[in-house]
Amino acid sequence: MWLNENIHIYRGSGIFCFNCLDGTEYIHESKYKLVCPVCGDVFELEPSLWNLVQDYRLEKGLSMAKLARLAGVSRSTVYNIENKYVIPKKKTVLRLAEVLGADKDVFLDKLEEIRKANAK
């Protein structure tokens, strides 16, 4: 599967630099930034809704249970969202964004991306 014109994923074994053509694997510079150790090419990953919920929750120092209580959802809902087991309802996404202090439009855009990807 091609992510863009510069990198290719080979059957889940890693992300390899297409510029180097020698099997050089990108390394994580940060959670969402990959760098080729040979040519220095950079690839930025786009976090999913699932990643954003977890990132914001951890940044705020909230447990899953605390986030769930504040958002009025079950702890299992938060767990299932963060572990990509469910596609959350719009109402749930809006509650989570509000509690986490996140941009609701960004969360809704990410939800729409998930829905479109799963409609195929």
Image (cartoon, rainbow, N blue to C red):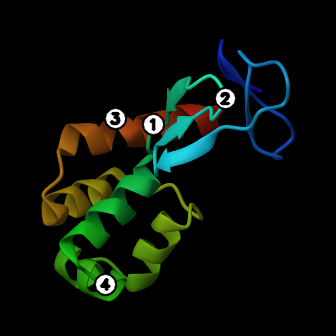
Q: Residue at x 68, y 30 (%)?
A: 120
Give me the residue at 38% from left, 65% from top.
54
Q: Mark on residue 5?
A: none
Give the label, 4 or 3, closer to the camera. 4
Q: Earlier in the sequence, mark 4 or mark 3?
A: 4
What residue is shown with label 3?
109
Up-down relation of residue 1 to residue 55 (above or below): above
Q: Give whichever of 99, 30 is nearer the camera.
A: 30
Left or right: where 94 falls relative to 118: left
* Residue 63 numbered mark, or none: 4
Residue 102: give x, y in percent of width and height: 18, 52
Q: 21 left or right of 25?
A: right
Tag in front: 3 or 2: 2
Residue at label 2?
A: 38
| Left or right: 84 in relation to 24 | left
- Disc 1 + disc 2, Cβ < 8 Å: no
- Looking at the image, tell me whether mark 3 or mark 1 is earlier in sequence order: 1
Callout 1, which amino acid?
Glu
Q: Nearer the viewer, mark 4 or mark 2?
A: 2
Q: Which residue is mark 1?
A: 46
Distance (Cα) linking label 3 and label 2: 35 Å
Residue, x 27% and y 62% (percent of image)? 56
Mark 4 to mark 1 CA distance (whole Å): 24 Å
The type of residue carrying mark 3 is Asp
Examine the rendered structure and indicate whether residue 101 appears above or below residue 46: below
Instruction: Estimate how packed mark 1 is, as few (under 14), some (14 to 19) or many (20 or more) residues with alpha carbons within 10 Å.
Output: few
